[in-house]
Amino acid sequence: MTQTPTARKVDQAGLKVGQAATIILLLAAFILNSWLLVAVVAVSQLLGALDVPYAPFRLLYKAVLLPAGVLKPRPEPDNPQPHRFAMLVGAIFNGTAALFLLAGLPAAGWVLVWVVIILANLNFWFNLCLGCLMYYQLNRFGVPGFTAAKLPH
């Protein structure tokens, strides 16, 4: 069942911090050949997807960057669920990548990492969230659990 669109707000600056942190940390993981750094990103994305207050990228934004005046909140009408779904997809990709890297399958692991890097860049630079688009398509098709409908522009 599709919910009627409502005027919820999502802090777009906070989302950008998570995307930037994901890109930077995954590039560092690739350069350093670190499965552990990939796993750290996966856990950080999972905690963000679960909307826990101590999610690392959220803490970076709210406890460091906002108080330092580096960024200002940019709340806009939006649904948080598609963004959380996109973070969950990233967490699954990165968690699987870390397991592949640990299992001695670097090609498979790094391909998954690069998929996340590319998708995070699309979102960061062009506001194109493919995970969000997936979420809204699942909502449109009436898949249970995907209850937030796309807000009108």
Image (cartoon, rainbow, N blue to C red):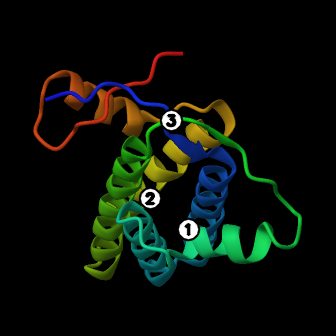
- Quadrant location of residue 2? top left
Which residue is at the front of the view, 121 or 151? 151
The three-letter amino acid code for the residue at tag 3 is Asp
Q: Residues within 10 Å of mark 1 (few under 14, many from 20)?
A: some
Q: Residues within 10 Å of mark 2 (few under 14, many from 20)?
A: many
* Cα–Cα gap, marks 3 and 1: 33 Å
Give x and y (percent) for residue 53: 49, 75
Q: Which mark is residue 113?
A: 2
* Cα–Cα gap, marks 1 and 2: 8 Å
SS assignment at label 2: helix
Q: Is residue 125 left or right of residue 44?
A: right
Q: Which mark is residue 146?
A: none
Residue in view at x 87 percent, y 72 percent:
68
Q: How many marks?
A: 3
* Cα–Cα gap, marks 3 and 2: 27 Å
Give x and y (percent) for residue 104: 29, 78
Residue in view at x 37 percent, y 68 percent:
46
Quick check: 93 above or below 41? above
Q: Which residue is mark 1?
A: 30
Instruction: Please tell me which of labels 3 and 2 falls first in the chain.
Output: 3
The three-letter amino acid code for the residue at tag 2 is Val
Cβ atoms at labels 3 and 2 below 8 Å apart: no
Q: Nearer the viewer, mark 3 or mark 2?
A: 3
Cβ atoms at labels 1 and 2 below 8 Å apart: yes
Residue 118 visible in the shown view: no
Q: Which mark is residue 78?
A: 3
Give x and y (percent) for residue 50: 35, 66
In this view, the residue farthest toward the right is 69
Give x and y (percent) for residue 32: 60, 78
Quick check: 91 above or below 5? below
Residue in view at x 21 percent, y 31 percent:
138
Q: Residues within 10 Å of mark 3 (few under 14, many from 20)?
A: many
